[in-house]
Every structure is written in structure tokens, then in C-alpha cells.
Amino acid sequence: LAGTVHMLKEDVWGNKTLLTVIREQDVFGETFACGNAFVASVSFYAASNSRILFLPFERVLRSCSMSCVFHHRLIRNVVTLMAEKNVQLMKKLEVVTKKTLRQKILTFLSLQAERQKGKYIVIDMNRQEMADYLCANRSALTRELTHMKADGLIDYDQNVFQLLGQEDKNVAIATPSR
């Protein structure tokens, strides 16, 4: 209902990977609630003050005795949300399977640019969260961003990024007004 939740995967050595950021009005945990596995292989962490609505999935998944149109719409919406999450995880896989950190960053920023449909890409993660999402070390991420900026591939000011084409390489980024 409010806030931000992170979906994390932790390995046996304590290394954490940020799988996805769940924002206000998003749904999470439905995959585990509707699957047969009783133990979730991920954790959910409230990254900011959050209000969560818990729904008993057993009651959501099964149509009520009245067979009302609203319940059928709810079930259809849940299935649609699960399909959209599947697409999101496929995009994450596209990012993290790149061989170099530079390729991961460029793929991540390209997908964000596509989603945000604008010249400026606003990333709602700090550098550590971004590094965790990219399965990279924060220092290495910061160093590579600096190199990419020097190479004229990107420009950025804090969490506002711009992918540069040939025509953009001589223009410094100005943080868009909010």
C-alpha cells in the first residue's frame, strides 16, 4: 500500500543479491503463496516505511460460492500480475547474464530508458542497491560508471542517468526539474 520493499536472495556465504524492487501498489509473494514450496528461497525487506496488505491467497485463488464477477476479475488480475513479474525476472536475467560489468550497466540503463520513455533515466536505488541488483561490487560499479562517463557512453548526476549517442556526447547532464 505504501513504501518500498526489496526482494533479496542470500547465498550460504551471506552474499545478497537484490532481485527486484517492489514499489507502492505492487504485489509480491504471490509466487510462493501459490506454489507447493513451503520455504521461500528469497527474503522481502522493507527498504522504507511500508504498509503491506496481506491477503489469504487460498481465499483469493478459489472463487467464492457466489461466483461473483469481482472475484473472477481478481483471479484474472493476479494471473496477469504473475505473468508481468515473469517478464520482469526475464529482463533481470538479461542484465545479470552479461559477461562484463559495463555490458550489465548498459543493458540495465537501456531497459530503464525503455520503461521510463524519456531522455533522462531516474534510478530509485542508491549505488549499493544498484550494485546488488547488478550482482557486482559497489566500488567496481562506481569505478565503471566513472569510466563509462569518461568514454562518453553515459552521463549522470547522482541517480539521474542519460545514455549518450554521438549527438549527445558534448552535452553535460542537467538534473531535470521535478
Image (spheres, helix red, strand yellow):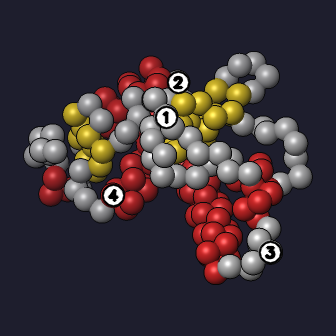
Q: Earlier in the sequence, mark 3 or mark 4?
A: 3
Are discs 1 and 2 less than 8 Å apart at CB?
Answer: no
Q: Earlier in the sequence, mark 3 or mark 2?
A: 3
Q: Which numbered disc, 1 or 4, marks the residue that appears first in the sequence?
A: 1
Between 131 and 144, the one lying in front of the other is 131
The residue depicted at 48 percent of the width and 52 percent of the height is 25
Measured in 3D between alpha carbons, the distance from the residue under mark 1 to the one under mark 2, in whole angstroms, is 27 Å
Using the image, determine if residue 18 lies above or below residue 57. above
Q: Nearer the viewer, mark 4 or mark 2?
A: 4
Give the amino acid type for the residue marked by disc 1 in the picture. Ser
Q: Secondary structure at mark 2?
A: loop
CA separation in Å, label 3 and label 2: 53 Å
Which comes sooner in the sequence, label 1 or label 3?
1
- The residue where tag 3 is placed is 65
Q: Please give the residue where the numbered disc 1 appears in the rendered image.
A: 50
145 displayed left or right of 75? left
Q: Residues within 10 Å of mark 4 (few under 14, many from 20)?
A: few
Q: Is residue 65 left or right of residue 156?
A: right
